[in-house]
Amino acid sequence: MAGLLAGIAAAAWLWFLALGRARGPVKRLALRATLLVVIGALVAVAAHKGLLTRTSVGFRIALLMALLTVAVGYLYMTRFCGSCGRMVRNLKPPTCSRCGAWLPIHGMTTRVRRPGDDRRWDPLEKRPRPAPPRDTAPRA
Ligand SMILES: [Zn+2]
């Protein structure tokens, strides 16, 4: 029963990460925390199985590097819409498929792809502060 509840909680959390409505930066922090927990769990399991204590230092480093590479790659590939928080695990679409807002260039930045001939995001130009996000409803 506890396992079922944990599974439901994990599914709900993943659903929130993928589709829940929250600001993009909030979701990115949540994704990073989730990855840290997952990596911590993997390392704990590996340690429990003796994978980290009975093997060479080189193997341990290689294992940790592999985990870090996967985590960083995942963070890079996973973008969140800054407006509605939709998760986009594909670097190709320039805009959010749910609300149409411009998406960040990649998952490690909040800078959005410059929208074609719209020059708002030219870093050499003084630009007005971006408009506040449209969803001002209180977050859960
Ligand atoms: Zn959106």
Image (cartoon, helix red, strand yellow):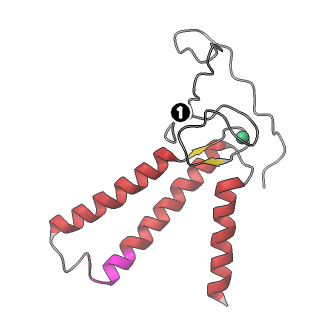
Q: Residue furthest front?
A: 92
Of residues 23 and 7, which is closer to you in this image? 7
Q: Is residue 110 above or below residue 114?
A: below
Residue 60 place in picture, x, y as percent: 23, 67
Of residues 140 and 82, which is closer to you in this image? 82
Q: In the picture, residue 42 is in which quadrant?
A: bottom left
Residue 65 place in picture, x, y as percent: 29, 57
Identify the magenta region. Answer: 44-51
Q: In the picture, residue 59 is in which quadrant?
A: bottom left
User: Which quadrant, please, contains the C terminus?
Assistant: bottom right
Residue 67 place in picture, x, y as percent: 35, 61
Q: Amino acid at mark 1?
A: Ile
Could you tell me which residue is drawn at 44 percent across and 72 percent down?
41
Residue at label 1?
105
Whether the residue carrying mark 1 lies under 8 Å from ligand 1 is answered with: no
Q: Is residue 4 above or below residue 21?
A: below
Q: Is residue 38 left or right of residue 21?
A: left
Could you tell me which residue is drawn at 76 percent across and 38 percent down?
99
Q: Main secondary structure of the magenta part?
A: helix
User: Which quadrant, please, contains the N terminus?
Assistant: bottom right
Q: Is residue 61 above or below residue 117?
A: below
| Secondary structure beneath label 1 | loop
